Image (cartoon, rainbow, N blue to C red):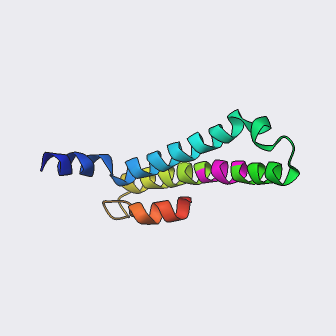
């Protein structure tokens, strides 16, 4: 019962957005830490790494946008109380 209450507090809509943004940033920084070791001799692999970097940084910016949209929806009185999008919709739009 206590564990369920703790998990409900961890996986709120705003926290899910922040966790996904942190995951996208960590993966992008892992690609940045070892770019030469990953793709030094293979140009196709180098292109794949650069595409992955762009994807993860774009996902980070998208989650940042979703977080600002969520905060605005919590402040404005026109939208529902829990925000515009639920957890799954935020993850779908962000990724």
Regarding residue 90, the answer to whether it shows in the image is yes
Q: Residue at x 46, y 46 (%)?
A: 18
Q: Residue at x 67, y 54 (%)?
A: 55
Residue 41 at x, y percent in the picture: 87, 43
Residue 35 at x, y percent in the picture: 76, 38
Q: Nearer the viewer, residue 8 or 81?
A: 8
Q: Nearer the viewer, residue 27 or 42?
A: 42
Residue at the extreme left? 1
Relative placement, left or right, of 70 versus 95 is left
Q: Residue at x 54, y 52 (%)?
A: 63
Relative placement, left or right, of 71 versus 5 is right
Relative placement, left or right, of 60 versus 83 is right
Q: Is residue 56 magenta?
A: yes
Q: Nearer the viewer, residue 47 or 39?
A: 39
Q: Residue at x 43, y 54 (%)?
A: 70
Q: Nearer the viewer, residue 33 or 95?
A: 33
Per the rendered image, the range of residues in magenta is: 53-59
């Amino acid at each position: 019962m206590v564990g369920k209450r703790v998990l409900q507090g961890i996986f709120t809509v705003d926290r899910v957005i922040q966790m996904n943004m942190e995951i996208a940033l960590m993966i992008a920084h892992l690609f940045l830490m070892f770019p030469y070791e990953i793709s030094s001799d293979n140009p196709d692999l180098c292109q794949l790494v650069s595409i992955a970097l762009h994807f993860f940084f774009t996902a980070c910016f998208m989650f940042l946008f979703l977080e600002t949209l969520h905060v605005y929806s919590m402040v404005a009185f026109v939208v529902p109380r829990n925000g515009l999008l639920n957890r799954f919709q935020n993850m779908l739009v962000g990724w």
